[in-house]
Image (cartoon, rainbow, N blue to C red):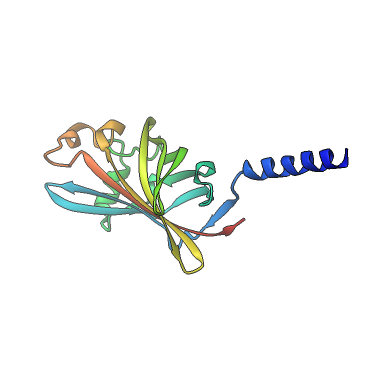
Amino acid sequence: MIRATFALALTTVVTLGAHAAPAARAVDYGKSRITVITRQLNVPLEGEFRRFNAQVLWDASAPQTSQAQLDIDVSSLDFGEKTMNDEATAKSFFDARTHPNARFVSKQVKAAGAGRYDVAGTLTIKGVSKDITVPMALKQEGGSELLEGATTIRRLDYRIGEGEWADTATLADAVGIKFRLVLGAAR
């Protein structure tokens, strides 16, 4: 009877441990970045979102249990030039007054070999939601883990650049999104 009880208790502990959710990870916002790259009149144009919030539950030993949600303040997009920044937040682009945040919510994380992962989730911009998959790499940087990834979206799918800006000869439809999240210890 004691052996049976001990075996049952051990099985319960092992099972609970195997399915435990990963711990929330602190994000070092001073070292983390989210950037966008596009082309205007075939000239490269790069901007950075200066304000975002990332909730990351990451476990490299069981990536399939990991989760992430990023909320990006679209009014913080900085191209280094006030006129461009103002245009980016206007109604024809991000419409920051009506839709102040873009959001990515992960649904599934799959290992892709050698520190690489595919993160599937939903990206919502300007009220439009699309499923995307973002390739990502995990690296060690000092005492922190670094998550880096990049993907390309079509801005017109999200109604970014309406009216005269819908012309893809003027402003490319393809927009690259790159991120670098520096994770500290579990909270």
Identify the residue at image location x=54%, y=42%: 65
Q: Relative to the observer, which residue lies in front, 65 or 81?
A: 65
The reply to whether residue 100 is visible in this rendering is: no
The reply to whether residue 148 is visible in this rendering is: yes
- Across and down, in percent, residue 187 comes to 62, 55
Identify the residue at image location x=25%, y=33%: 156
- Across and down, in percent, residue 119 comes to 41, 42
Q: Residue furthest bottom?
A: 142
Q: Residue furthest right?
A: 1
Which quadrant is home to the N terminus? top right
Identify the residue at image location x=43%, y=63%: 31
- Across and down, in percent, residue 118 comes to 39, 43
Q: Relative to the observer, which residue lies in front, 36 or 5?
A: 5
Identify the residue at image location x=34%, y=37%: 95
34 displayed left or right of 165: right
Would you place residue 92 above or below residue 33 in this image? Answer: above
47 displayed left or right of 4: left
Q: Relative to the observer, which residue lies in front, 24 or 94?
A: 24
4 displayed left or right of 143: right
Which quarter of the figure has residue 157?
Answer: top left
Would you place residue 46 above or below residue 126 in this image? Answer: below
How many callouts does the rendering have?
0
- Across and down, in percent, residue 164 comes to 17, 34
